[in-house]
Amino acid sequence: MSPVSDNDSDDLLAERKRNFASSLSVSYANVKPLTMVRARGQYMYDHRGLEYLDCRNNVPHIGHCDERVVRAVSEMMATISTNTRYLHPVRQELAKELLSTFPAPLTKVFLVNSGSEANDLALRLARAYTKKTKTIAVERGYHGTTSLTISVSPYKLRKFTQGSSTPQPDWVSIIGCPSTPVAAAESLQMLRHEASKDEHGLCAFICESGMSVAGVVLPPDGFMREAYGVVHSHGGLCIADEVQVGLGRMGTHFWGFEQQGVVPDIVTIGKPLGNGFPVAAVVTTPEISRAFDDEGVEYFSTFGGNTVSCSAALAVLRAIKEDNLQDHARDVGEVLKEELRRARRETPHIGAVRGSGLFVGVEIVGTTSTGGPPSLAPHIASRLVARLLLDHNMLTTLDGPGEGVLVIKPPMCFTEDNARTLVRAITQVLTAIDAEGGGRQYQSIPT
């Protein structure tokens, strides 16, 4: 690729605005739009060769452009790229490797292209099995961009303007986000009410095992076990969305739902499975799979489960084991959280620190003179993210209520030194913001 100048980068942004809808956001749009041309491991490089520490992208799960994935994809692309109607050993190897990470009775897998497609299929599977449509979702949850999945994604659904083409459908009920023990108790009460009020019965309950755009919410211990019991007592199925936190990211377990001691009826896996190559999966039970078969319509996706995407996913699963990335995520995550908690002594703007493994959320808070708990300070958080980019070449992101939570979910090769470097930069920026007082406010563009 030919070199890209600053002028070329400006032209790229102008052309993008001309050729693409404005609903496709650009990260750091009003700070410093980035022209990224290369990446490796936990680093990305712009058109000038500047190196950025990537603290936000969980799509390159084992590291940007990992040579094992690149080699597997390149070799298969040069050999054969074809669909699931033809037999090929790589597809069976992937199924065996993936299913070996799940407890019984989760023994059937569908291979698809994206997390949105996976969650869409999960809802279809639940409808086929229960013959119902009533679905319960969780406030601030996000499950995808198809018509079905955006209907169970309050994070997006709440943002549509009045009178839009996507109102909340009558088959969806939304319960509170279980962000604290008190909120979780209220959420369970809402779940019991919503599950029992429809005389026709319940189809499904869908929830992320770790809620990213909610601001790194891990439901309190026992929440999922109680919720699953309620749902099953009303004939519904439980769908665990593992797109953000699966594949060892939580450190303690390979799948997020395992932290809660539950076994879902359906599990969805998304973007990290291919390390940047489009592949995703749905895992379920033989009984649910059979009910879907019995509907009499073939399920086929031209690219879902193609030989190239299977090669990518298989390379990722093997690399997680080879590099011991689950334990690595646990250890680095503990260092990261400890450093963040220690940094509270240097700045009052670091609030609650939560998460598991390399899935960590940091509340950015204001100061209070009333003695009460400090509240989230999105205006400070947006300045923090901008300054981490401009002054320290670090890529970070905000989510949660008002976009006041710094969400850290880097490639899994992120190191303890990276964690310490990030926390030092966060502390320096927050201290500088206090010293400066007012200043330019930046729009946050979450991912």
Image: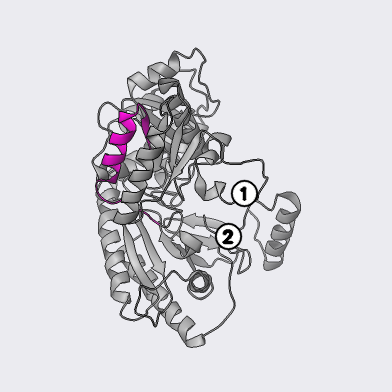
Q: Position of residue 434 (x, y in %)?
A: 46, 84
Report crowding for label 2: few under 14, some 14 to 19, many 20 or more residues within 10 A (C-alpha): some
Residue 88 shows in this picture: no
- In front here: 420 or 192? 192
Q: Quadrant of residue 289?
A: top left
Q: Position of residue 143 (x, y in %)?
A: 48, 42
Q: Position of 35 compared to 410: left or right?
A: right
- In front here: 237 or 230? 230
Name the residue tied to disc 2.
Answer: 27
Question: Which residue is drawn at the image coordinates 66% and 56% (left, top)?
Answer: 2
Q: Quadrant of residue 122?
A: top left
* Outermost residue, right side: 18
Residue 36, relative to residue 186: is it above or below?
A: below
Q: Position of 307 compared to 220: left or right?
A: right
Q: Which badge, 2 or 1, comes first in the chain's sequence?
A: 2
Residue type, numbered disc 1: Phe
- In front here: 338 or 292? 292
Q: Position of residue 7 (x, y in %)?
A: 71, 66
Q: Position of 18 compared to 70: left or right?
A: right
Reply yes or no: does residue 217 show up in magenta.
yes
Give the spatial CA distance, label 2 vs label 1: 21 Å
Question: Which residue is drawn at the image coordinates 26% and 44% (left, top)?
Answer: 260
Name the residue tied to disc 1.
Answer: 160
Residue 63 shows in this picture: yes
Q: Secondary structure at mark 1?
A: loop
* Outermost residue, bottom side: 435
* Residue range highlighted in magenta: 216-241
Question: Which residue is drawn at the image coordinates 50% and 69% (left, top)?
Answer: 378
Q: Position of residue 83 (x, y in %)?
A: 51, 23
